């Protein structure tokens, strides 16, 4: 147990609400799928994982800030889509974050179980099935949120003997964004490795298929095309549509669950963007009126001045104003999200 005194941190929850949390540091925390520094902390008897970028690490490796940003974007989106009552056990739960701190951080509920690698070779038939279903249910939920994990593999999975949890979203992307090239070739799809096209929620299905095959056969992919000619027929029937097709023809996680006769529809979720369109339209109209006739809208939201030519203080103030408006609108919308919940 660390001897450091408790620390009060300021952060925001998944809906942008400001919070103060008293944290007591417990110990170092390591997961095989994480690059970021991590500590186990406690807040009101609730055990949390604190991921952060220390100033020294940030100076050495500035890309760590991007990894933390990826984790926060994924966690907030998942939290907004499912809400506190329907948050899936297969995914980590974001409690708070602060990207403006000298040591930016994210707080997540303590993970389930232990890293799955140690148990992967000792699973019985029932556990292997639960492992497969848990992985696909996790990806069905990320797909519903429009989030792509980006590094689905054994190092990103935890297991408690019955349930699976997918963690470490440091490589996460949002569906529709341009793909980022690179990553571990042993688990990234051809499209992800090349960085071509837009992110698709089926990108993660490739890594999941390789992991399912690994758990079934004890064969760990090394980046080479796996020889599946001797795989059991039932396994080939499940995975060939994934590993043998381009992303636009691959099945979705829910499709694979249906083939395993285990698609229960998943937890209820809501689209956090629903209801914002009208508010955005009113805001844009107000901006247009304020700009006056003949003044075009600008990429940075500036009223009546060429993009990038406004003073720094004015530009930051304008962006803060727009972000605050959209944030307040989002919070108001989510208060009524229960009425828009769907399966």
Image: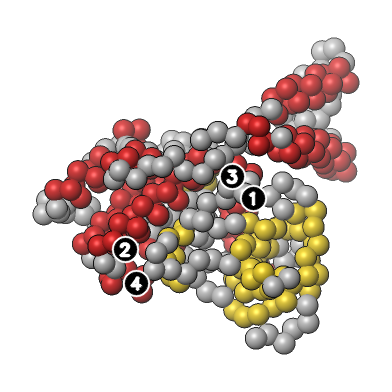
According to the picture, the residue beneath numbered tag 4 turns out to be 119
Instruction: Please tell me which of labels 1 and 2 falls first in the chain.
Output: 1
Residue marked by disc 1: 84
Query: What is the C-alpha distance between the residues marked 4 and 2?
Result: 10 Å
Q: CA distance from mark 3 to mark 2?
A: 27 Å
* Image coords of residue 115 (percent x, y): 43, 70
Residue 300 occupies quadrant: top right
Q: Residues within 10 Å of mark 1 (few under 14, many from 20)?
A: few
- C-alpha distance separating marks 4 and 1: 30 Å
Sequence-earlier tag: 3 or 2: 3
Residue 30 in sight from this viewpoint:
yes
Circles 3 and 1: CB atoms closer than 8 Å: no
Badge 2 marks a residue whose secondary structure is helix
Dot 4 or dot 2, earlier in sequence: 4
Q: Nearer the viewer, mark 4 or mark 2?
A: 2
Dot 4 alpha-carbon crowd within 10 angstroms: few under 14, some 14 to 19, many 20 or more = some
Q: Which sits earlier in the primary sequence, circle 4 or circle 1?
A: 1
User: Left or right: 4 with respect to 311?
Assistant: left
Q: Which image quarter is the N terminus in?
A: bottom right
User: Where 118 sits versus 162, above or below?
Assistant: below
User: Can the viewer see residue 207 in this picture?
Assistant: no
User: What residue is drawn where x is 64% and y is 71%?
Assistant: 47
Label 1–label 2 contact, CB within 8 A: no
Instruction: Say which of 320 and 132 sits in front.
Output: 132
Circle 2 residue: 127
Tell me what residue is drawn at x 39 percent, y 54 percent: 135
The relative height of residue 107 versus residue 328 in the rendered view (above or below) is below
């Amino acid at each position: 147990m660390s001897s450091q005194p408790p620390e009060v941190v300021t952060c925001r929850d998944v809906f942008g609400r400001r919070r103060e949390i008293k944290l007591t540091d417990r110990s170092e925390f390591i997961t095989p799928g994480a690059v970021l520094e991590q500590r186990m902390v406690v807040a009101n008897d609730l055990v949390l994982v604190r991921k952060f970028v220390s100033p020294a690490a940030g100076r050495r490796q500035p890309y760590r800030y991007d990894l933390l940003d990826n984790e926060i974007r994924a966690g907030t989106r998942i939290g907004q889509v499912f809400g506190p009552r329907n948050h899936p056990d297969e995914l980590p739960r974001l409690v708070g974050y602060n990207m403006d701190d000298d040591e930016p951080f994210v707080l997540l509920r303590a993970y389930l179980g232990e890293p799955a690698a140690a148990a992967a070779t000792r699973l019985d038939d029932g556990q292997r099935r639960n492992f497969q279903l848990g992985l696909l249910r996790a990806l069905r939920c990320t797909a519903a949120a429009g989030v792509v994990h980006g590094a689905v593999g054994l190092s990103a999975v935890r297991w408690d003997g019955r349930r699976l949890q997918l963690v470490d979203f440091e490589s996460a992307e949002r569906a529709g964004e341009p793909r980022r090239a690179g990553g571990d070739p042993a688990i990234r799809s051809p499209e992800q490795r090349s960085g071509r096209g837009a992110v698709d929620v089926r990108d993660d299905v490739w890594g999941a298929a390789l992991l399912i095959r690994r758990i079934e056969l004890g064969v760990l992919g090394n980046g080479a095309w796996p020889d599946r000619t001797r795989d059991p027929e039932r396994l080939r029937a499940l995975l060939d549509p994934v590993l043998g097709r381009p992303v636009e023809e691959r099945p979705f996680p829910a499709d694979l669950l249906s083939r395993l006769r285990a698609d229960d529809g998943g937890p209820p979720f809501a689209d956090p963007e629903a209801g914002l369109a009208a508010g955005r339209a009113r805001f844009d109209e107000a901006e247009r009126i304020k700009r006056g006739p003949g003044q075009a809208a600008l990429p940075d939201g500036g009223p009546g001045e060429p993009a990038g030519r406004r003073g720094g203080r004015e530009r930051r103030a304008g962006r803060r104003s727009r972000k605050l408006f959209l944030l307040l609108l989002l919070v108001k919308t989510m208060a009524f999200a229960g009425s828009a919940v769907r399966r």
